[in-house]
């Protein structure tokens, strides 16, 4: 059956796209609105961006988000790289291990958030960045893992044999051949994990202590006080940064080596 | 002095239990220093596996491998004094040609200037001196092949292992590289263990050839003996064109062929019963009708430049190939005419069947 011949396929398609992207478009548009009322357009202005940059709570939240994203993506990329190296060779329970690593893709985020909260509280660790980092790392692992795994599967095993043939032990083979060949995948995984951590809301919301608010958590609490153009501005910045990073990640993923 | 490579009763299986497949069956070979040694056999006979055992990428279940008198089985690949030219070259795509060639020299304790000098030498040897800064992806197949050779030769290994290094090249380039390879081996004075499934390549290059079949070495001899005195029917069939004639031999060594010919062969007496007689097309002689061991009818005659190849039908129905030099050829009968075929006793090999 030809899908194109179905009545209204095109119209339905446009509706879906509009439903998905129109709100985002309006949010971006109104972040440049000079008027404080979020629903009335008056003139073009970037003053909300200026205010956003000077707002101390947003500054703190942005810093927290960035620190968290860097540590979480670094940690998860290292773990994902080790896991991907191990998963190259068959061992009993390999698929179970891979499924566990990728569980955060499927498990409801709220469940992970609540469970981690209970764990953190019962162990007696203070809420804050120190409890958020491990949770972010765990959550970001599959996003770092998938691009690295794809690289490893596409890698010619003969390369490492050639290195060992030329007197490299296991460690220098990894350093001089394996890692350079996997590097685009590692970078792709790192950026993808970075974006994931930036956008992570529920886990951060549950585990954040005083002073460790992240941007998504800040936006959520600010919006309860009413929609402000500042929120539109900070949301637009997050949107642009996320899209840019995902594009960077894809570019790394497609890089030839 | 110990041999360059000494392989003693090596057996190798892949898989476990009921799924185990024995790929090498008690293989023993001694390879001399500076020898050009070739493993020849059809695809799947275990050539690559034997090479990988020597290099250390696989471990044998039984037997020993000694290089220059030193037992290798406990040593990982990076501690063995051998280098490999891989079938797919396996050049490092992220490194330049010069960096690829320097790869095995770094970490040997050689100084930076020493490494640079030896990289230059190795690249000169394969005439790739002008390509130092290129990446492997910017080279043609033949050029990649040369770089792979330079990379493996630069650390001056005791033994160089080459796994079908020329099979990806087109015919003309392959012929040219064969000559260069032989020259290189003589200049460098390194033992070569060369793997190929191309019998012509094996015969032209090697000092000695081991013909492998289903995980065993059937015959190990110099090229001429392999070609002229094959020890097994498989070897005779695998190397070059050959005619097989079925028959029986009695205890006195008289061979009665199904096609009617009767031959005497003193060596054949040991194997009485059903046998096949093998003779190469260029060793059989065309003689006037009735004067040879058997007559054949001419089916077709092909001019090959170097000679004439006749297809003849024997009385039993099978086809016989006969080659002769074009210049000396007596006038041919018309198609369907008969010619005599002589099977000189010195030219035949006899195999039990
Ligand atoms: N790693 C392996 N696992 C299982 N079987 C293998 C493996 N490597 C080779 N074989 C088998 O061993 C046999 C010999 O292979 P190989 O040494 O590559 O032959 P050749 O190089 O002569 O073509 C083949 O039947 C092949 O399928
Ligand atoms: Mg092979």
Image: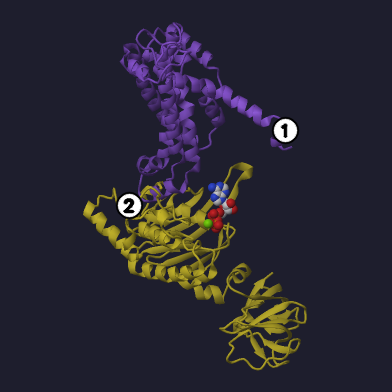
Q: Residues within 10 Å of mark 2 (few under 14, many from 20)?
A: many
Q: Residue at x 41, y 53 (%)?
A: B91
Chain B rendered in what hue?
yellow
* Location of the C terminus of chain A (image quadrant): top left
> Residue B16 has which mark?
none
Q: Is residue B157 left or right of residue B315?
A: left
Circle 1 chain = A
Q: Residues within 10 Å of mark 1 (few under 14, many from 20)?
A: few
Is the residue A255 above or below the residue A199 in the image?
A: below
Q: Residue B40, image x and y in percent?
A: 53, 64
Quadrant in which residue A32 is drawn = top left
Q: Which chain is purple?
A: A
Secondary structure beneath disc 1?
loop
Q: Residue at x 72, y 33 (%)?
A: A6
Residue tagged by mark 2? Answer: B99
Q: Residue B14, image x and y in percent?
A: 56, 47
Q: Residue at x 47, y 39 (%)?
A: A151
Residue B339, visible in the rendered structure: yes
Q: Residue at x 53, y 13 (%)?
A: A111
Residue tagged by mark 1? Answer: A6
From this viewpoint, which residue is outermost toward the front? A42
Quadrant in which residue A106 is drawn = top right
Q: Residue B189, image x and y in percent?
A: 34, 66
Residue B26, visible in the rendered structure: no
From this viewpoint, which residue is outermost toward the right? B316
Disc 2 Cβ-to-ligand 2 distance below 8 Å? no
Is the residue A229 above or below the residue B270 in the image?
A: above
Colour mapping: by chain
Q: Is residue B280 left or right of residue A238?
A: right
The one nearer the camera, A188 or B54, is A188
**Which is closer to the viewer, label 2 or label 1?**
1
């Amino acid at each position: 059956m030809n899908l194109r011949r179905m009545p209204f396929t095109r119209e339905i398609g446009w509706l879906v796209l509009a439903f998905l992207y129109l709100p985002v478009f309006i949010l971006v548009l109104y972040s440049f609105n000079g008027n404080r009322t979020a629903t009335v357009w008056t003139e073009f202005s970037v003053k909300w961006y200026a205010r956003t940059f000077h707002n101390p709570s947003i500054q703190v939240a942005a810093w927290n988000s960035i620190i968290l994203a860097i540590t979480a993506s670094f940690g998860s990329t290292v773990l994902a790289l080790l896991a991907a190296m191990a998963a190259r060779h068959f061992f009993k329970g390999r698929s179970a291990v891979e499924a566990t690593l990728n569980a955060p893709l499927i498990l409801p985020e709220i469940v992970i958030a609540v469970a981690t909260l209970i764990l953190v509280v019962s162990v007696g660790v203070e809420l804050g960045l120190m409890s958020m980092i491990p949770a972010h790392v765990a959550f970001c692992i599959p996003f770092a893992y998938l691009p690295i795994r794809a690289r490893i599967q596409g890698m010619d095993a003969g390369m490492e044999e050639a290195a060992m043939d030329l007197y490299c032990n296991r460690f220098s083979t990894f350093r001089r051949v394996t890692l350079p060949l996997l590097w685009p995948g590692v970078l792709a995984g790192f950026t993808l994990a970075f974006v994931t951590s930036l956008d992570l809301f529920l886990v951060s919301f549950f585990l954040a202590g005083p002073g460790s608010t992240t941007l998504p958590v800040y936006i959520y609490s600010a919006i309860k006080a009413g929609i402000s153009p500042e929120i539109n501005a900070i949301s637009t910045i997050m949107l642009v940064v996320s899209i840019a990073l995902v594009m960077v990640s894809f570019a790394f993923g497609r890089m030839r080596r | 002095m110990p041999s360059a490579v000494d392989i003693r009763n090596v057996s190798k299986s892949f898989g476990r239990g009921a799924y185990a497949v024995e790929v090498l069956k008690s293989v023993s070979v001694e390879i001399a220093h500076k020898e050009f040694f070739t493993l020849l056999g059809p695809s799947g006979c275990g050539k690559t596996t034997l090479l990988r055992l020597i290099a250390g990428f696989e471990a044998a279940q039984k037997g020993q491998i000694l290089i220059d008198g030193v037992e290798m089985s406990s040593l990982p690949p990076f501690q063995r004094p051998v280098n490999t030219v891989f079938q797919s070259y396996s050049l490092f795509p992220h490194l330049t040609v010069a960096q690829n060639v320097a790869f095995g020299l770094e970490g040997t304790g050689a100084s930076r200037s020493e490494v640079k000098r030896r990289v230059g030498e190795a690249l000169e040897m394969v005439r790739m001196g002008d390509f130092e800064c290129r990446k492997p992806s910017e080279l043609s197949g033949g050029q990649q092949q040369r770089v792979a050779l330079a990379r493996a030769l630069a650390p001056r290994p005791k033994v160089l292992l080459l796994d079908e290094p020329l099979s990806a090249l087109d015919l003309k380039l392959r012929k040219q590289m064969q000559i260069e390879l032989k020259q290189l081996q003589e200049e460098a004075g390194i033992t070569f263990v060369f793997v190929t499934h191309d019998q012509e390549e094996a015969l032209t290059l090697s000092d000695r050839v081991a013909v492998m079949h289903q995980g065993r070495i059937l015959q190990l001899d110099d090229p001429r003996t392999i070609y002229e005195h094959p020890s097994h029917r498989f070897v005779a069939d695998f190397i070059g064109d050959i005619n097989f004639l079925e028959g029986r031999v009695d205890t006195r060594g008289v061979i009665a062929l199904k096609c009617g010919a009767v031959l005497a062969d003193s060596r054949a007496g040991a194997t009485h019963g059903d046998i096949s007689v093998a003779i190469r097309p260029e060793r059989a002689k065309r003689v006037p009708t009735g004067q040879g061991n058997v007559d054949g009818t001419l089916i077709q005659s092909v001019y090959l430049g170097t000679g004439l190849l006749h297809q003849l039908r024997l009385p039993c129905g099978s086809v016989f190939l006969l080659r002769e030099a074009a210049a000396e050829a007596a006038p041919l009968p018309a198609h369907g005419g008969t010619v005599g075929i002589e099977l000189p006793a010195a030219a035949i090999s006899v195999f039990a069947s």
